[in-house]
Image: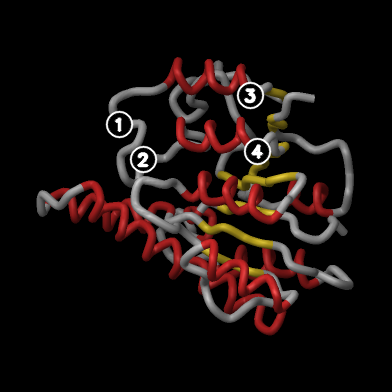
């Protein structure tokens, strides 16, 4: 079992099947990992909005809504996704979704697993996860996504994309700048890391581990303290 006060960010799309229905089995399996711990402690899970949030955002854009309004929709969906995990965790979880760092600090007094989504427009849930890790003094942040880690280019578009097993903060910055475009901060744009997240990472000096959350096997191995896991580690060590 990992130590207390770990921060885990799970992509919202991992909670849904390819047919865009709620993947109850995946949510139960994810929750079971925490339930298997003798003393789960105050772990904090940050849940993204995922593909459902992006559908709402696309609709708002079709109404010529602002990017700030799109962000608000994304935040609300991420909080609804968070409530799914809370429902699965039952009495192990703090029953409410904190909507600010102040609410998070109150929730931490109850020694429960805390699940939260976005906080404010213009901020990705990855940035939220890093901010929460920094605030709580977590040593590591685990990011579960739909690919095994960070690649040198988009693995969904390029068959020859190479998984990068270790990156320093400077190397990550170079990769972000290389792949950035004018939509970098647009609501609902999917990036494992963005420029804002990078700045929080560099100031906090937190070790980040990116794993596939598709079948949860790598996350189980991480949770059990195994060292041979497939993913990307971001640190300056």
- Residue 169 got which mark? 3
- Comes first in the chain, label 2 or label 3: 3
Note whether 188 is above or below 201 in the view shown: below
Quadrant housing residue 74: bottom left
Note whether 145 is above or below 98 in the view shown: above
- Comes first in the chain, label 1 or label 4: 1
Note whether 126 is above or below 82 in the view shown: above
Label 2, label 4: how far apart the Cα atoms are: 24 Å
Label 3, label 1: how far apart the Cα atoms are: 22 Å
Residue 93: x %, y % from top left = 66, 76
Label 1, label 4: how far apart the Cα atoms are: 26 Å
Contact between labelled residues 1 and 3, with CB atoms less than 8 Å apart: no
The N terminus is located in which quarter? bottom right
Front-lying residue, 93 or 52: 93
Residue 215: x %, y % from top left = 66, 51
10 Å neighbourhood of mark 2: few (<14), some, or many (≥20)?
A: some
- To which residue does mark 2 refer? 189
Q: Indicate which label's residue lies in the foreground, 4 or 3.
A: 4
- To which residue does mark 4 refer? 204
Q: Indicate which label's residue lies in the foreground, 1 or 4.
A: 4
- Comes first in the chain, label 2 or label 4: 2
Q: Secondary structure at mark 3?
A: helix
- Residue 234 got which mark? none
Contact between labelled residues 4 and 1, with CB atoms less than 8 Å apart: no
At 57% across and 58% down in the image, what residue appears? 46
Label 4, label 3: how far apart the Cα atoms are: 11 Å
At 74% across and 69% down in the image, what residue appears? 32
Contact between labelled residues 3 and 2, with CB atoms less than 8 Å apart: no
């Amino acid at each position: 079992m990992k130590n207390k006060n770990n921060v885990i960010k799970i992509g919202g799309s991992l909670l849904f099947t390819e047919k865009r229905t709620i993947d109850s089995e995946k949510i139960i399996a994810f929750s079971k990992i925490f339930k298997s711990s003798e003393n789960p402690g105050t772990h904090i899970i940050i849940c993204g909005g995922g593909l459902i949030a992006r559908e709402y955002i696309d609709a708002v854009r079709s109404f010529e809504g602002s990017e700030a309004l799109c962000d608000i929709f994304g935040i609300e969906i991420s909080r609804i996704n968070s409530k799914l995990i809370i429902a699965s965790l039952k009495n192990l979880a703090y029953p409410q979704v904190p909507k600010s760092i102040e609410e998070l600090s109150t929730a931490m007094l109850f020694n429960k697993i805390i699940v939260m989504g976005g906080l404010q427009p213009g901020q990705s849930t990855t940035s939220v996860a890093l901010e929460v890790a920094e605030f709580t003094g977590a040593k590591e942040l685990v990011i579960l996504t739909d690919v095994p880690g960070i690649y040198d280019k988009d693995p969904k578009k390029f068959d020859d994309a190479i998984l990068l097993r270790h990156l320093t903060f400077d190397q990550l910055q170079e990769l972000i700048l290389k792949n950035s475009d004018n939509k970098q901060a647009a609501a609902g744009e999917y990036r494992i890391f963005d420029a804002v997240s990078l700045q929080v990472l560099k100031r906090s000096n937190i070790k980040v581990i990116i794993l596939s959350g598709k079948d949860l096997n790598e996350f189980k191995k991480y949770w059990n303290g195994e060292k041979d896991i497939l993913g990307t580690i971001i640190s300056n060590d």
